[in-house]
Structure formats: structure tokens, C-alpha cells
Image (spheres, grey):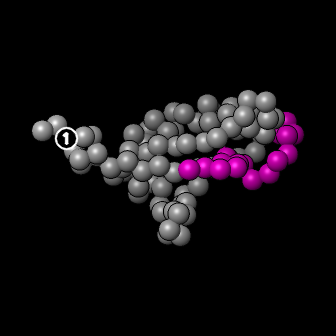
Amino acid sequence: MKKSILTHKMKFSAIFFWGIVFGSSFETDSTKQEIYFPATVTSSAGNEIDVAALAKTHIMIVITIKATWCPVCRQQLLRIKEQLGDFEKCN
């Protein structure tokens, strides 16, 4: 009997990011600000989750919803592209 990937002790965690992930304002000025990945996130059950601790034991999947025509979304896409190396270090 074949076992699915999920039954082979692989735990998948998805963190859904709605809105602005890497910034806290809708400003589109050209000044670069320091942006950090959140240290903790809140689960749908209301529990605080330590992202760094979770990344050590789980495969992390980041899902972000963007529109290519949206100026704020385009800035976020560029920020995500710049930080891909940091995500690769996690897993």
C-alpha cells in the first residue's frame, strides 16, 4: 500500500499572508525602508506561532496573493524576489 507524502512524517505548514507582508503602509515613495519577516504570526485558531522555530521542524510554504497591475503589490513582489535567498536558507 502506497503511503502519501503526508504520512511519511512530512509536516506541511502554510502561512497565509493577506495584505501587506513585508511592509506596513501603502505608500509608494522611492525611499527604501528596513523590512523584516515577522518573528511570530497568529494561526487561524488564535495561537502565536514562532516562525523561526517552525521553520526548523517543518517545510514552510508562503502563499501571498498579489495583482501585477497593483503598484503596492508590485513593490511587494520585488521585495519577495530580493529575499528569496533568505527563504531558501529556511528549507
Front in this rendered view, residue 68 or 31? 68
Give the amino acid type for the residue marked by disc 1 in the picture: Lys
Q: Quadrant of the C terminus?
A: top left
State the predominant SS element of the stretch in magenta: loop
Residue 32 lies left or right of residue 6; in this view the side is right
Q: Residues within 10 Å of mark 1 (few under 14, many from 20)?
A: few
Is residue 25 one of those drawn in magenta?
yes
Is residue 18 one of those drawn in magenta?
yes
Residue furthest to the bottom in view is 46
Front in this rendered view, residue 20 or 81? 20
Q: Quadrant of the N terminus?
A: top left
Q: Residue at x 55, y 42 (%)?
A: 63
Q: Is residue 71 above or below residue 9?
A: above
For label 1, the residue is 3
- Locate residue 20, reporting x and y percent: 70, 49
Residue bounds of the magenta highlight: 16-31
Q: Is residue 43 above or below residue 65?
A: below
Which of the 4 image quadrants contains residue 82? top right
Residue 43 makes an appearance in the image: yes
- Locate residue 19, reporting x and y percent: 70, 49
